[in-house]
Amino acid sequence: MEQVVIIGAGPVGLMLACELSLTGARPIVLERRAGPSDLPKANGLGGQIVQLLDNRGLLGRFAEDSPFFGRPPGFPFGSVPLRFDGLDDVPLRVLMIQQPRLESLLRERAAELGVEIRWGHEVESLAEDPDGVTLTGRAFEPRPRSGPGFELRARYVVGCDGGHSTVRRLAGIGFPGTTDDEVLRLGHFATADTTHVFENPCYDGLEPGWNRTPHGRLLLTSLREGAYVVGVKEKRDPGEQPDRREEVTPADFAAAVRRVLGRDLPLGEPIWLSSTVGQARLAERYRTGRVFLAGDAAHLFPAGGSALNVGLTDAVNLGWKLSAELAGHAPAWLLDTYEAERRPVGAHTLAHTRAQAALESQSGENGDALRGLLAELFAYDQPARHLAELLHGGDTRYPVPGPLQAAGQPHPLVGRLAPDLALTTAAGPTRLAELLHQGRPLLLDLAGGTAASGGPIDVVTATTADPPADALLIRPDGHVAWAGAEGLAEATAAWFTPASA
């Protein structure tokens, strides 16, 4: 029997496989595609996942070829710009990286850790029993979609297979929500000189970013040298299938531009064309028995910029918990905390991306007035700082688990992502992020003599300027499980003592 089978070799499935393998588990990844995709469906990472990559020692590798990494000078909230000029404490960091490159780097990391990816494997049935999960399906390569059947037994199965998740459907988990009444057609086009594109007289009257017309909206931007992006958003034909990606031809795309803009644009050689309909959905459950959901299989957001941050942090949260369970280090309630912690994050993100989508879609004079007023409000430091924290995910604070709720009022850091403290240890200067590279629990003694532990927990004595507490008990995902010497022994036992102990 396999330990964990992950369905889907996109960014979330690959990240989860890396997290599991880092701590000794041996997952298998099944992917229905015959091989890696080169479609630039996403263009960057933003929020807490950037810090989590740093915690794993991967940030330098991922940022090496990035056209931009760091704190952005601003960020859109819906279609209203936020500016961060003069705000030194804004936590939001952005890493520009297109999805094919992101997946390639995650596959490299997975290969280093010994992860097995089986391409061309499509799951068709799922049956759970008290001891495990049985998966059956077809192995095929290349198309047409036919080939020999396969059967796998696993202790756990995780669906990382996107918005149309087969795992979610087979597990009987509902996916309520709404579907946008507009369709977005997005095109990446090759060009020798991006500046020349925007200076072309045919583009007169258009600005970089979103341009509104009486018939819809048109996006013009460039995300990398040698290519520019055009997006067209308009009301969806009632007969258009909202739940399926439709093939878009250059003629289709040109016609959509003409309908929205009222004239043709010289679009150049297409690299990639797509058509999507936004959806706002949240799975009714993230877990049923031995089956879990993560990423787009668990949530779909109607505004961009949050899906990868939330999906990849789902993977980091679930990875260490499954590993602890497989290694016999987990208390009985640990796996239940995955849904208890991550589903509220999905719901919170869904709420603010719904607000962004509503703000962006309002048309006419009323919409212009609303966006204008909010732009004035967002120019003040406190609203800009608050929304930056929201987009970053820094307002996330996981609840204290039941076994510790009687331990008194927890420190403000408990449940939050630990700050990357500058530390001095017996080995010399370091950062907290460097102590988390191996994905193990960490007990950080900042007072000397306050921390004592064993088992799966690493213990490090260090000093730091203005320590937040005498000791920090930090989970493998970087979140603070407990802070302070008082109650530390109880917290350590609660989080890291197996059910059989």
Image: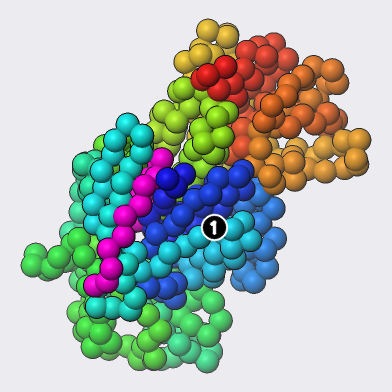
> 141 and 259: which one is in front?
141
Q: Position of residue 233 (x, y in %)?
A: 27, 69
Position of residue 2 in the picture relative to residue 276 (left or right): right
Q: Position of residue 497 (x, y in %)?
A: 59, 21
Q: Position of residue 184 (x, y in %)?
A: 28, 68
Say which residue appears at 48% left-offset and 89% top-offset: 191
> 223 and 66: which one is in front?
66
Residue receiving disc 1: 115
Indicate yes or no whether the magenta region holds residue 392: no
Position of residue 315 in the picture relative to residue 492 (left or right): left
Indicate yes or no whether the magenta region holds residue 165: yes
Colour convention of the picture:
rainbow
Image vertical order of residue 167 relative to residue 470, above or below:
below
Q: Amino acid at mark 1?
A: Val
Q: Position of residue 472 (x, y in %)?
A: 70, 26
Which of the 4 quarters of the picture holds residue 479? top right
Residue 177 at least partly seen = yes
Which of the 4 quarters of the picture holds residue 246? bottom left
> 482 and 437: which one is in front?
437
Say which residue appears at 36% left-offset and 34% top-offset: 131
Residue 46 at least partly seen = no
Position of residue 466 in the picture relative to residue 320 (left or right): right
Mark 1: which secondary structure?
loop
Rendered-image quadrant of the C terminus: top right
Position of residue 400 in the picture relative to residue 149 (left or right): right
Q: Which residues are magenta?
A: 146-166
Mark 1 Cα shell of 10 Å, populated few (<14), some (14-19), many (≥20) = many
Rendered-image quadrant of the N terminus: top left
Image vertical order of residue 137 relative to residue 351, above or below:
below
Say which residue appears at 46% left-offset and 54% top-offset: 28
> 423 and 389: which one is in front?
423
